[in-house]
Amino acid sequence: MKKIAFVAPWFGENIPGGAEMAMREHIKHLYAKGIDIEVLTTCVKQFTADWNIDYYTPGLDTVMGIPTRRFKVRKRDTHAFDVVNTKLMNNVSLTDEEEETFVREMVNSPDMYKYISEHQDEYSLFVYIPYMFGTTINGILACPEKAVVIPCFHEESYIHMRIFKDVFEKAAGMLYNAEPEKILANEVFDFSNVKQLTLGIGLDNDFSYDEKRFREKYKVNDPFILYAGRKDVGKNIYTLINYFREYKDRNKDSKLKLVLIGGGEVTIPDDIASEVIDIGFVDRQDKYDACAAASMMCQPSIHESFSLVIMESWLCERPVIVHNRCDVTKNFVKESNAGLYFDNYFEFEGCVDYILNNPEVADKMGKLGRKYVLETFDWDVITKKAISFFEEIAQ
Amino acid sequence: MNNTEVIENIDIEQIMDEIRAKIKERGYTEDMLKFRDVAADMNVSMDVFNSGVFSKVVEQTNANSHINYYEIPIGTGLKGFVKRCIRKMISFALPPVVFQVNEYNRSATQSINQIHAFIKKYESDIKEKDKQIAELKKRIEQLEKNG
């Protein structure tokens, strides 16, 4: 195999985001297996930066020891993009012209597409991640026969854009994070001519976790539900806050706390301010210790294409509760028997009470979760599967 | 029975059935809750102010405040022809309404932008004042200790 290029709108060692982290990890493990990897990206710093600003200098760079080619971005009409993007966020379908505006005015680098087109013979494959960015759409069009996509699809208005259908159905391969993502993709697109594989994301599991260490360091002695991740409306965190508030109101004697870890800001109602402990960003060790100390982790998001945090909770042997309307996390829970799921407040209350009142079963769920992650998401297994998939397409 | 056998016996569907049966048995209904239980991205309590959510909504309001009635694409072919005919037939009534709606939207959006700017300004002022109060409290405590 020749070089494999991973293509993303931004790339850096510490930039936040699930897809960004997944890409870094895939690259790191493929590189360690001796695969010749290169990254093609723009000069934009990260998702939350201004997509009109070239933060990095264009040209060849090295990130995590990986050769990284950065290209200048095209200046965008931000207002035109915001208008159509707002419609999508509000589930209003777009006209063909508006879809074209969306793709044209989002992050794009014509220099990158020219490079892909002119240098395609030097590469076996171009792997794009995630699906909705200009770099993915226009990159695929520059050389569709060598395009593999790690789309990170989930049910949202963007996936139903007609303009994506024409592009993704031309790609050579699709790699999914979870089985429900594959099912969704095949409901929306005709991938009869596209090679597909549910790969998943691997997890490092050689770490320790200590419940006592967390309790001593953060002075949390009561049982608690853990929320780990970006504190963002899009992650459905206010459902959890509302539910916890109602739970405390209906169970006045309960000592249960809600512990939040991760970035972002969240507004906690005054009446439960003393019951919610927002620790903010913590290092990895503290996160694992928090997972181990929690009675359960709650992942309320309904738009997950993987969810690393529930895997981390399982690796620390604690059960999880997830939202019924997120096919991906619910499927993980059902496959592993290592947690419960809720569709409304009363089911949430039922799940929380069940786990608190049945500590032995909860411990067993945690053990099942760990077993599931170790068997399914070991990096060695994932990387081997990825390499044979790439080889098959490259032939 | 060894540990592996024990842990493999868990069936979460059975547990979920038990939980649902209990909910039914106790006769829980949504009207017992103090909030509207909807699983949505913008599921924020109505009585809790969130600066980030407010900014996002203001952004959306600005982006959507103007209706370009004449720029709405109607396509080609027979469907497009029919749509064009309908647009002509209602042209005496619709544009004035759209004009009025746009005028209203403009005023409403400007008002919201003003409120947003006001909140943002006072948010930073309050933060600064809180800092000053905390420092003054410290100094008072120190002075009280010293005598």
Image (spheres, grey):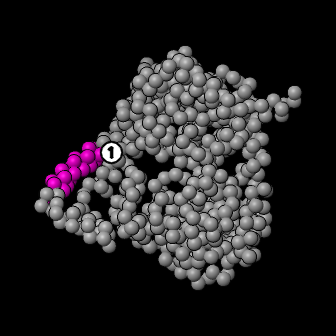
Boundaries of the magenta span = B95-118
The residue that mark 1 highlights is: B120
When the figure is inspected, residue A236 is found, relative to residue A30, above or below; the finding is above
Give the image location of residue A159, x and y in percent: 50, 58
Would residue B15 appear left or right of A83 to someone viewing this image? right
In-front residue for pair A305/A196: A196
Residue A28, magenta (yes or no) = no
Task: Please give the name of the residue rendered at 44% of the width and 26% of the height, measured from the top-left corner.
Answer: B30
Residue drawn at point x = 26 percent, y = 70 percent? B81
Amino acid residing under circle 1: Lys
Task: Give the residue at the far right of this rendering.
Answer: B1
Q: Is mark 1 on a helix, strand or loop?
A: helix
Out of A354 and A298, give the one closest to the viewer.
Answer: A354
Whether residue B114 is in magenta: the answer is yes
Relative image position of residue B42 (x, y in whole percent): 42, 42
Q: Which chain carries label 1?
A: B
As drawn, is B49 to the left or to the right of A292? left
